[in-house]
Image (tube, rainbow, N blue to C red):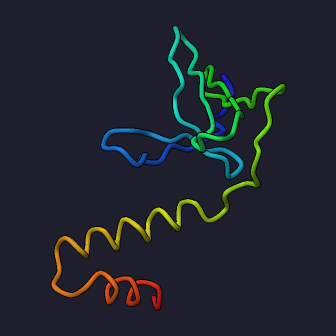
Amino acid sequence: MAAQNYRTIPGQKTGSVLYTADSFYYCVNKPENDTLYLQCHISTCNAKATIRENVLTHTPWTHHSHDPEIYFEAERELINRIKHRVVTENGSWREIYNDEIRR
């Protein structure tokens, strides 16, 4: 069996998962037997991939309509920190945002 060539990160919705390889991010389109069929998480992109035997393979006849998202995870972490602080701390969201951006 080949080594796993992708990582998983939490998706935007509770309990959801995104699969990432080469700075592209995919969500499950449909699971079927021993294969996961994936689609790009950007709704306007038609790129697809599969995971079989722990190996993510980009579908050769579909291509991403965007560049790799090299800052996606850092942006997601920033947004989640801001959301958490807005709910748990006093102060305006603008102050919290500015504080997080300065970090």
Quadrant containing the N terminus is top right
Q: How many marks?
A: 0
Q: Residue at x 61, y 20 (%)?
A: 53
Query: Which residue is outermost to the right?
Result: 61
Q: Position of residue 16 (x, y in %)?
A: 39, 38
Q: Position of residue 70 (x, y in %)?
A: 67, 62
Please say if 102 is above or below 29.
below
Q: Residue at x 52, y 19 (%)?
A: 30
The image quarter in which residue 99 lies: bottom left
Does 64 sit left or right of 80 as displayed? Answer: right
- Give the camera-side residue of 5 and 79: 79
Query: Which residue is outermost to the front?
Result: 44
Does 19 sit left or right of 82 as displayed? Answer: right
Does 30 sit left or right of 63 as displayed? Answer: left
Quadrant containing the C terminus is bottom left
Q: Residue at x 50, y 17 (%)?
A: 31
The image quarter in which residue 19 lies: top right
Please say if 9 is above or below 50.
below
Q: Position of residue 39 (x, y in %)?
A: 61, 31
Please say if 60 is above or below 102.
above
Q: Residue at x 50, y 43 (%)?
A: 8
